[in-house]
Image (cartoon, rainbow, N blue to C red):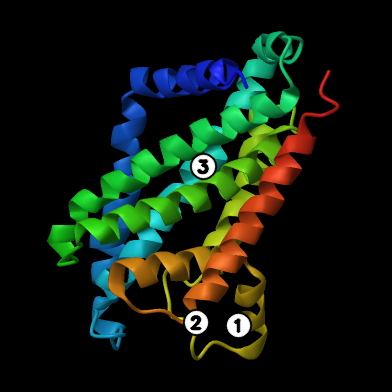
Amino acid sequence: MNLRPVYIIWYRDILRFYREKSQIYTSLFRPVLWLFAFGMGLRPSFQGMGGFNYVQFIFPGVIAMTLIFTAIGSAISIIWDREFGFLKEILVAPIHRSWVVIAKALSGSTLAVIQGALVFIFAPFVHVHFTVDQILLSLVVMFLMSMALTSLGIILAARMSSFEGFGAIMNFVIMPLYFLSGAVYPLKGLPGWLYTVTMINPLTYGVDLLRTVMLGIHQFSVLSNIVYLLGFCTLMLTGALFSLRYES
């Protein structure tokens, strides 16, 4: 099995990200704003959960926010490559199209995990402490979430012909996924209809699993979180594999 084409496409996306270091700096602004402005502002009104204050409670959610914006946003490279003819050159190459999708999913996931991992530098400032095992497990969960979200982004980008259209639909997808995932508030005590919606949202289980690993608190069983997250990842990756099937 020749994986060199996958590596080349993956490396190209990583190299392009590395050369645009402004993306790294701007990606840190959103977590800082949420942790130290939004989080600190709402901290007095939060009763606490599992011995953690509000800023600590939303810390995994802020990482999830970084993952979802980066992972889905990374798929815009497909529109960029289509615009400049590079995508057509890849698709006519003597490799199966599924390798192109897998490479794009891997590169987007890698970038999302890198940017999500950068948020860990703020953990000491909000008094969240991790062991080495917690960090490693967190990275695994973050990669699974990123893989699913990047695949979702590929599905969307494969049907978009403009950057503006992708940006609009991306926000339309990101906002409900994030705010209805329990990332910024506990799910207990929600109105029945809203709780049902959060239960349908697959990102809910990824956030809960991430919070379980980082803080040791959870609202669903670990097994349920793993099953839902793996199922979501498999479904999205399968959809992404079919998304470029009829690309000309």
Q: Amino acid at mark 1?
A: Tyr
Q: Which percent across, then down, holds residue 85?
A: 69, 9
Q: Nearer the viewer, residue 61 or 227?
A: 227
**Left or right of residue 119, residue 97 in this image:** right
Q: Which residue is mark 2?
A: 187
Q: Which percent across, then down, holds residue 27?
A: 35, 40
Name which residue lies at 75% across and 44% down: 239
Name which residue lies at 14% across and 67% down: 127
Q: Which residue is mark 1?
A: 195
Name which residue lies at 64% across and 58% down: 232
Q: Are marks 1 and 2 in contact (CB under 8 Å)?
A: yes
Q: Nearer the viewer, residue 107 or 18?
A: 107
**Left or right of residue 176, residue 63 in this image:** left
Q: Amino acid at mark 2?
A: Leu
Q: Are marks 1 and 3 in contact (CB under 8 Å)?
A: no
How many angstroms separate mark 1 from mark 3 (CA)? 26 Å
- In primary-sequence order, the first of circles 1 and 3 is 3
SS of the residue at dot 3?
Answer: helix
Q: Which residue is mark 3?
A: 71
Q: Nearer the viewer, residue 140 or 159?
A: 140
Q: Which percent across, then down, holds residue 87?
A: 68, 15
- The residue carrying pointer 2 sits among few (fewer than 14), some (14 to 19) or many (20 or more) residues within 10 Å by Cα, namely some
Name which residue lies at 29% across and 89% down: 47
Q: Amino acid at mark 3?
A: Ala
Q: Which percent across, then down, holds residue 80?
A: 61, 20
Pick the quarter of the image with the C terminus: top right
Residue 161 numbered tag: none
